[in-house]
Amino acid sequence: MKRAPTSCRLAAAVLALLAPALAAQAGSEPLLSIVRHEAPAGLRWTVLCQDVPLDELLDALARKAGLSLDASGASLAGATLTLELRQRPLEEVLAVVLGSQGLVPELARRTLRVTPEPSDPQELLRLALAAWQVVEARGDGHAVARARLARGELLELRGELEDAYALYAELALEGAGEERHEATFRAGRVLQRLGHWAEAAQHFRTLAGLEEAVALRTRARLELARCSIELGDAKSAVHLLNFLAANFPEADATELAERRLVRARAQNAMQQHLEALRTLEEGDLEAAPEAHARTLALRAEALQGLGFEVEAARGWLIFARDAARPEERSAAFRRAAELALAGGDELGALFVCREAARSGADEGLGALAHQARVRLGLDEDEPPATIQERLTLAESLVVRGDMERADELFEGLYRARGALPEPDQARIVAGWARVLAERSGLAAAVQLLSQSRRTLLDPAALRGLDVAAAALFEAEGRFAEAAEAYRGNY
């Protein structure tokens, strides 16, 4: 994922696109002109300046606008500006003047306060979106199209995929030239992220057939191959990749790496696991996004397909350690534990379950841990000696549906939780919440999770509680609340 743009500098840049800078003349004296206009839509300002120190410009602008200036929290020394802004709202003028220097204006109670731009990524994204909206409102056709593409990218960064798709789809229908093709491609990529593979494939198929979409035709075919795998037609994906290799071999390093990764995935889907492993060894893959994690997953799938369950389990365990998304991490730990058991490595399965617990991603692994312990001859009917053993037993009881015995164990564990690391405390709370959900209802369980969340600091522990809360909401079909729970809101 791309880093969030520096919003205030971006605001200054995109707004300046709409008003060319005042031409500098060699040897001329610094120029400063500020004119206030009464307009039906409100006050407008024209600011013309050439090589004027920032502090002088702000002081003059504040005096003209009848504002007091407070720049005590920002450094203005040394900066000079050359601008030509005509009949703009004051807020827009300040965004350009200060945004170019990484500063933010705040207008309140007849005071102009100047502060450094915020460091919070979400706030930076919000400010950047506002800047592009100004461009879209005031620019010509080309500027409007570029602004919509930029806004769509920012919405993607914020996770607002449906809104991003709507923006791209509108531009794909109404736009022209390169912007229209780019919008079509991005709309397809968003549909992939949403899991709408057939609709995404149609977007890429359209692009692949456009002679004028030169810059995107090969990328569209590659994405079409990815969609074909998801739609169960891996052979078509291989045909597309062969066409690209024969007709467009001179792609950049990133696209070549992507082609290899997609080919290996298609070969795994076709049960050609040895060929998939060979493809992964054919060339450099590091140029592709998330190349290391994706390669680990493809190797693990190939090893599993070849019957090397223990080796595949180790691959999924390494993948789980590196996975960024909680759902990927939990699924990888589960696959690792299942494959370790399938390969007869019960100790390995227990190791996986314990590592998953330390990462707060052990939801649903209690039954696998119980199975491993039984195979190793550990009698779980005897009273467990340690807190960790009692916790593992309590989790396995929940998985088996023995809520009465689990309730007794979890109640005692809850009272003794202070002796454990925070991730284990979260396991206790998450397990007891599942028991409470059965015994007293969802509200009581969520209340326990919410109260406990306010007492913990460890990120892994908090993630464990969030995943547990989301699972409880999902079990009740309350998916919107589950999505919020993943964000820590419940």
Image: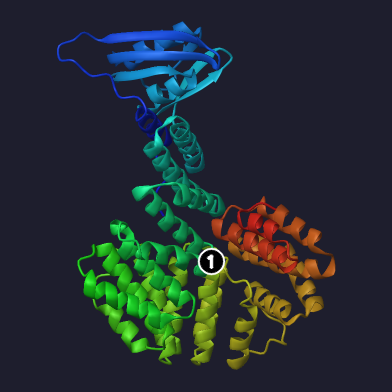
- Let me know if residue 351 appears in the view: no
- Let me know if residue 431 appears in the view: yes
The residue lying at 79 percent from left, 67 percent from top is 437
Give the image location of residue 390, x and y in percent: 68, 76
**Residue beneath label 1, please?**
196
Front one among 101 and 72? 101
Amino acid at circle 1? His
Q: Quadrant of residue 114?
A: top left
Q: In this view, does 344 lie above or below 399?
A: below
Left or right of 51 in this view: 267: right
Q: In this view, does 304 lie above or below 256?
A: below
Give the image location of residue 195, x and y in percent: 53, 66
Front one among 405 and 288? 288
Left or right of 276 in this view: 367: right
Decide: few, some or many residues near mark 1? Use Cα within 10 Å; few <14, some 14-19, many ≥20: some
Q: Quadrant of residue 64?
A: top left
Q: In which quarter of the image is residue 285?
A: bottom left
